[in-house]
Image: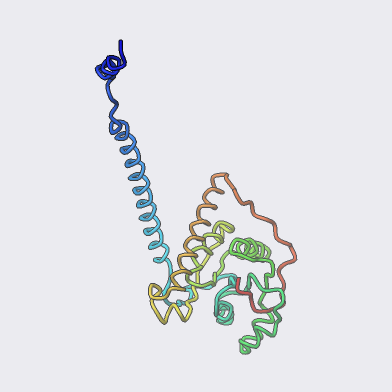
Amino acid sequence: MGPRARRQGFAGQRMGPEIDDSSRRLPLIVMVGRTFAGVVATLAIGFFVAAVGFIGFLSQLRGAEIKPERKADGIVVLTGGSSRVSDAVELLAGGYGRRLLISGVHPTNEASDITRSLPEARSFINCCVDLDYSAINTRSNAAQTRRWAAERGFKSLIVVTSNYHMPRAIVELSHAMPSLDLIPYAVVGEKWRDEPWWTSGPTLRLLLSEYAKYVAAEARLRLADLGLDLAPEVDLPTGSVSRRPATAQAN
């Protein structure tokens, strides 16, 4: 057979069935599409749940300061926001509690710092104020408050902190002292009163940050109740509460 015949023979051969690449791509496209749709749906559900939770968080925040409806054995103020300490001292002077614990005091502060700003309350400060120098966050605030209340046999406490911090504070304090009656007194800052929170970038960021911390605290404590304590509590020094008054650090 000559070269021409061979070329014709090869040209006349029937090839096998061709494979359509689109038939292979179709299942892959469907799988990718379903995965993308699942991710989008999951993100949408997560965003919806977070938004509902944030609205629920906001509903707990008071927009005005309201005096407690009843008195308590003691008062605890958690440092970190403006006018918290002065409001707590005013409650003490008004007879709402027998003693006041300022939790989270900076170790360098002196007695003159608080008496200088509240000279009219000097007598109450000198006789009835205890200071906690060890607490550095809300969780350690709760631990030190528990120790302080137990030493004095208190059964009820007025809790003083900023309105945006109150939900997380009550969660931590309630977990640390489930048998105590906690009465919240929310301090409302000037910025909160002067303008709506949704018009202020810094206030909105503060609220979102506090909401995230609140959710994290709730999750940690719920897991702890189930026996899954992922962050065991560290014992604080026993000599961390002093009767020497001072102002508090912003932590």
Closest to the observer: 136 or 22? 22
- Residue 23: x and y in percent read 28, 31
- Residue 105: x and y in percent read 66, 73
As drawn, is 243 to the left or to the right of 34? right
Q: Classify 187 as above or below 223.
A: below
Closest to the observer: 163 or 129? 163
- Residue 128: x and y in percent read 66, 77
Residue 228 in sight here: yes
Residue at x 55%, y 75% (from the top left corner): 81
Residue at x 46%, y 73% (from the top left corner): 202
Q: Residue furthest top?
A: 1
Q: Classify 43 as above or below 249.
A: above
As drawn, is 68 to the left or to the right of 32? right
Quarter of the figure that contains the C terminus: bottom right
Q: Could you say which quadrant of the image residue 30 lies in?
A: top left
- Residue 216: x and y in percent read 51, 56
As drawn, is 162 to the left or to the right of 23? right
Closest to the observer: 218 or 17? 17
Residue at x 61%, y 65% (from the top left corner): 137
